[in-house]
Amino acid sequence: MTLRIVLSALTLLGSAAAAPVVPAETITQATLGETGQKTEEISTEELKQVLADKSATVLDARPSREFAMSHIPGALNVAAKPGVAMSAYVSDVAEISRLLDGKKDAPLVLYCNGPFCGKSKRLADELLAAGFTDVRRYQLGIPVWRALGGVTVIEPEGLQHVIADDRTAVLIDVREADAFRAGSLPGARNIPRSLVLEGKDVGEVKRAKDDGRLPMEDHNTRIIVLGGDPGMARTVAEAITHEAFQNVAYFAGTYAEAKAAARP
């Protein structure tokens, strides 16, 4: 009996060795793989490609305040469907139709707060019922986007809320030191863009980890990055994200716009 089991196992191993090798799926290529859904999921890798080539409209299916606080760069947001309880929140399909000039074949990608969030599924179902024909979901959502090193954008309304109400947030001003010394937002810390190098644990970002400008004892701290222009802010935000900080957003405007948004 034992011999037969061993021979059977060897036969199976031989068959496996002869079978073609299937490349392992990377984490950025993964989806939830849920069955029974009316709309297709896309992976983080696919979403990045959609954003890069602008091949679809990416819609954040969360409430406007939540969108303003932190959203995937390039995503859009519309108002809530009227008369719906917050527990059953869904975006207004009529607003989406206006956004797309009534083009119901326009490609759409929806996302919300991750695997357990129902907002993008509810919106997808309502879009299909309204006749939209090309609807997909990034069901992993903004939590997995962040976990895989993705930065987010904060809107003026969100920045104003953080400065007024979030005493734990860290503001990073990436302008040069002389501009920072001339004035910045209350409590901001300076990490000049020109001193930020490519790679991990190098340059000014490493120094900021060592001297306390970055919150090394709580990597979940909200970090807001702003600068002279959105490109500067995004570059430093990405560098900070790649140091394992999980809640990093950049302000996609100028310093003057950030200063105006920060006023009560």
Image: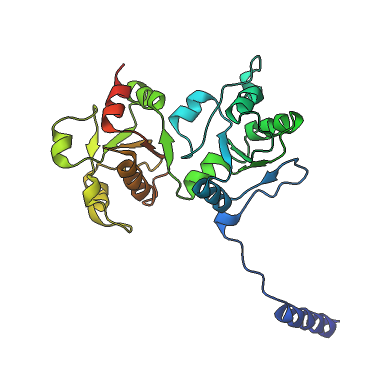
Q: Nearer the viewer, residue 144 or 109?
A: 109
Residue 148 location, x and y as percent? 49, 50
Residue drawn at 84 percent across, 83 percent down: 4
Residue drawn at 56 percent across, 26 percent down: 78
Q: How many marks?
A: 0
Is 12 drawn above or below residue 55 in the view shown? below
Is 22 drawn above or below residue 51 in the view shown? below
Is 167 drawn above or below residue 235 in the view shown? above
Coloring scheme used: rainbow
Q: Tell me the quarter of the image containing the N terminus.
A: bottom right
Residue 177 location, x and y as percent? 16, 41
Horizontally, residue 70 falls left or right of residue 29, namely left
Question: Outermost residue, top direction?
Answer: 83
Instruction: Inspect this view and state whether residue 246 appears.
Output: yes
Q: Quadrant of residue 8?
A: bottom right
Residue 165 location, x and y as percent? 36, 21
Q: Tell me the quarter of the image containing the C terminus.
A: top left
Residue drawn at 73 percent across, 81 percent down: 18
Residue drawn at 80 percent across, 84 percent down: 7
Residue 67 location, x and y as percent? 49, 29
Instruction: Inspect this view and state whether residue 113 appears.
Output: no
Horizontally, residue 36 falls left or right of residue 52, namely right
Is 229 drawn above or below residue 23 in the view shown? above
